[in-house]
Amino acid sequence: MNPSSPRRQGRSGAVDSPAETEPVLNAVDRQLLNLLQTDFPLVPRPFALLGQKVGLSEEDVVEKVRSWQKSGLVRRLGPVFDSRRLGFKGMLCAMAVPPEEVEAVAGYVNRLPGITHNYVRESWRARQESAGAKAYPAARYNLWFTIIAPTQQEAEAQLAAIAAHTGITDYMALPASKLFKIRVQFAVEEPSTGGQEA
């Protein structure tokens, strides 16, 4: 599950704006959001079991999740697979895309199977301007995405096909060699009151 943040980047390649009206979360909401991320039950009626844990009905839990998705508080509710343990290979890719073509190229990449992340690095222009292209040559790579495929050769073939389809010839392939992050959890905590303890 991915709770939203004020600025978030996803497969669209663009940064989403925060929801216009942020939902007010009570203690039960926060507990439920934490359980959705860390202890989602693999049973026929998971929302009923989650409801039992937080004191809500199954219908209430389903309605809360729907409203959080509609408001943008929750972007996605779904499984995350360990692709390495399933035998797949991952590769980070970077492309130097002309600014006027970024949306079209990102949109095309998003429709392909095996793309797990796709984002624009907003600061690349500033780095290039301040350091200069010669001092910081990688600054020209503004569109970054990951490809997961059954083999390294298939991942590389997909990147070559993307380049051929889009006409982008300036790109890098960075195959994964070590796993640094295995999970992401957004702990939903009680908001601070700003007071001092006696």
Image: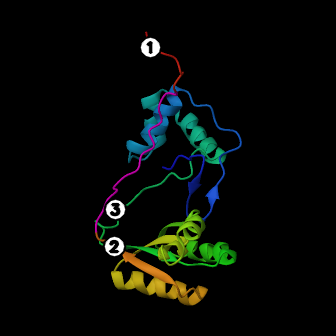
* Above or below 129: residue 180: above
Give me the disc on residue 82: 3
Q: Amino acid at mark 2?
A: Phe
Contact? badges 1 and 3 (CB < 8 Å): no
Give me the disc on residue 197: 1
Percent across and percent down for residue 5 are: 56, 46
> Which sits in the foreground, 57 or 75?
75
* Above or below 190: residue 142: below
Q: Amino acid at mark 1?
A: Glu
Looking at the image, is mark 2 or mark 3 earlier in the sequence?
3
> Which sits in the foreground, 193 or 154?
193
Query: Magenta: predominant secondary structure element?
Result: loop
Query: Which element carries disc 2, helix, strand or loop?
Result: loop
Q: Quadrant of residue 156?
A: bottom left
Q: CA distance from mark 2 to mark 3?
A: 9 Å
Question: Mark 2 highlights which residue?
Answer: 88
Q: Is residue 190 magenta?
A: yes
Magenta residues, start to end: 178-191
Q: Quadrant of residue 151?
A: bottom left
